[in-house]
Image (cartoon, helix red, strand yellow):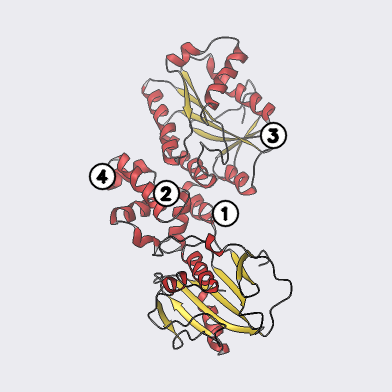
Amino acid sequence: MGGEDVGREALDSGRGGIAVLDSAGNITWTDEAWTADDEGGGLPRAAIGTNLLQAYRGHEDPRAQAVANGIVAVFEGKAMYFEIEHRASRESGRSFLTSVAALRGDGAGAVVIHKVVGGRAPPNPPPPVDVRSTSTAPIRDGMERLTPREREVLELMAAGSDNRAIAAKLGIQYTTVRGHVRSVIEKVGARSRLEAVARAYRNGWVAKL
Amino acid sequence: MRTSSGAPAYPIPSHVALLHYGESELRDAVSEFLLAGLDRPSEALVCFGEPGVGERLLRYLESRVGRDLSPDYRAGRIVVGAADPDVDRQLQNVIAPLEALRASGFALVRFVGIVAWNAPDFPPPEDFLWFESKLNEVISGFPVIGLCPYDLARMPARAIVYGALETHPFVLSGGALRQNPQFMAPDRYLRERLLTLPWLQDEVRTAIQPLGGGVGIHDRHDP
C-alpha cells in the first residue's frame, strides 16, 4: 500500500492523527495538527511546521523515538512501511497503532498515522530490541547532499557509464571521477556503486532509463 | 561450436561463462583453455582473480606443462591481474593489460577471471554483475576470449546464477560451447535486472510490537 493510500484510508476512516512529512521531517500537511495525544497515552502532540524527527528523536518517550527511527528508515530507503504498536500503560490497557509509509515522487516524504486500535494489548508480547539501533544520520534528501558535479556523476553512473567514460564526458581526470563516485556512494548511504544507482532511480533523483 | 580438433571454437572477441561444478571441472576446463594458447607465440594469457588467485593459477599451469613459465611472465606474455573491491578499478585492471597486450601485437589474448562472491577483495555481487555486463562493451575492441568460471556448487543465490547467464553471450558447460539465448545487452541488463536485484530492494515490512509501556522493533516476515 502506498503512502497516499495509507493517508487516504486514514482520512476516510475519520480516525486517528495524520501527519504528512517532507523529506526533512517537517509536517507539511495534516488534518489539523497531529493531535495524537490521547489522554497522555498516545504520542506527543505535534503542530504543523514541527520538525517531527528532531522533536521525537530528542524526546524522552521511547515510543516517540521509535516513530522517529521508523521515519528515518523510510526516508533512508531501508523500508517502505513500518507499523508501530504500543501499549500506553499496563493500567490503561489502551494500545495504539502508528503507521509510517513512504511517499514517493517529487517532495517525497512520509505519512504518519496514529490511532487507537484496542483496549487491551495482546498477551505474551515479543521481547524488544534496541530502538536506537536505527541510523541517526542527518535526514535530508540524498540528492540534496550531493554537489552539482556529484549529481552529474551520479546521472552518468545511472546511465551505465564507467569512470573512464564519465571522465571523458565531463572533461575531468579519471582520479577526480573516482573521488566523486566514492563520495556519491557514501552520501546516498549505499554500500556499492549499483546500490547507489538503484537508490537514485527509486527516489527519482535521475531520469528513468 | 567446435573446431575440427574437437576444441570449442570461440569467436573473437567473446565473453564466456564457464559453468562448472567444483574444483575438478574448473581445473580441467581452464587448463584446456589456457594450454591451447601456451604453445602459440602469437597468443598471450591473463590469469585474473582475487589477489593471489592469478598467481596460483599460474603455478597450476606450470605443474600441468612441467616447466617454469616465469620467462613468459617476465616477458609480459603471461599477465597476472588482481580483482579490486572498487568495481571500476577492477574494470581498469582488466582494460590495462588488454591494451598493453594489443599494443605488443598479440593476435589473441586468453583471459581467465576466476569469479568470487562476497570476498573481501572482490566487489559486492551487484557491482560484480555490472562489471560482467560492462565487459561486453569493453572487450569489443580487443582480440580476446574471456572465460569466467562460475562454480554452481558454490553459488549463493539464484540471482547470481541468472546473472552469469544474462551477462555472457556464450556459455561453456560440460566441454560444449553454446551461444547463450539468455544473454542481455548491458543497457537492458542494467535496466531490467541490476536495478531490480532482490537484495537492492527496500520494501521491508517491519513492525514494532507492543510491550508493557515500551516498544521494540521486530522484522515482520509475513507480507
Q: Are marks 1 and 3 in contact (CB under 8 Å)?
A: no
Q: Are marks 3 and 2 on the same chain?
A: no
Which quadrant is home to the N terminus of chain A?
bottom right
The amino acid beneath tag 4 is Gly
Q: Distance of mark 3 from mark 4, alpha carbons?
A: 46 Å
Q: Distance of mark 4 from mark 2, alpha carbons?
A: 18 Å
Where residue B137 sits, quadrant-wise, is top left
Q: Are marks 2 and 1 in contact (CB under 8 Å)?
A: no
Q: Is residue A10 left or right of residue B153?
A: left
Q: Is label 1 or label 4 in front?
A: 1
Identify whether A39 is placed above or below B13.
below
Q: Tag 3, which secondary structure?
A: loop
Q: Distance of mark 3 from mark 2, alpha carbons?
A: 32 Å
On the image, numbered disc 1 is attached to which residue?
A: B199
Sequence-wise, the earlier of marks 1 and 3 is 3
Q: Chain of mark 4?
A: A
Sequence-wise, the earlier of marks 4 and 2 is 2
On the image, numbered disc 3 is attached to which residue?
A: B21
The amino acid beneath tag 3 is Tyr
Q: Chain of mark 2?
A: A
Q: Chain of mark 1?
A: B
Q: Chain of mark 3?
A: B
Q: Tag 2, which secondary structure?
A: loop
Q: Who is closer to the viewer here, A148 or A118? A: A118
Q: Is residue B217 left or right of residue A52?
A: right
- Expressed as whole percent of the image width and height from the top left, the position of residue A92 reads 65, 85
Q: Are marks 4 and 2 on the same chain?
A: yes
Q: Distance of mark 2 from mark 1, alpha carbons?
A: 19 Å
On the image, numbered disc 4 is attached to which residue?
A: A171
Identify whether B83 is placed above or below A67.
above
Q: Are marks 2 and 1 on the same chain?
A: no
The residue furthest top is: B67
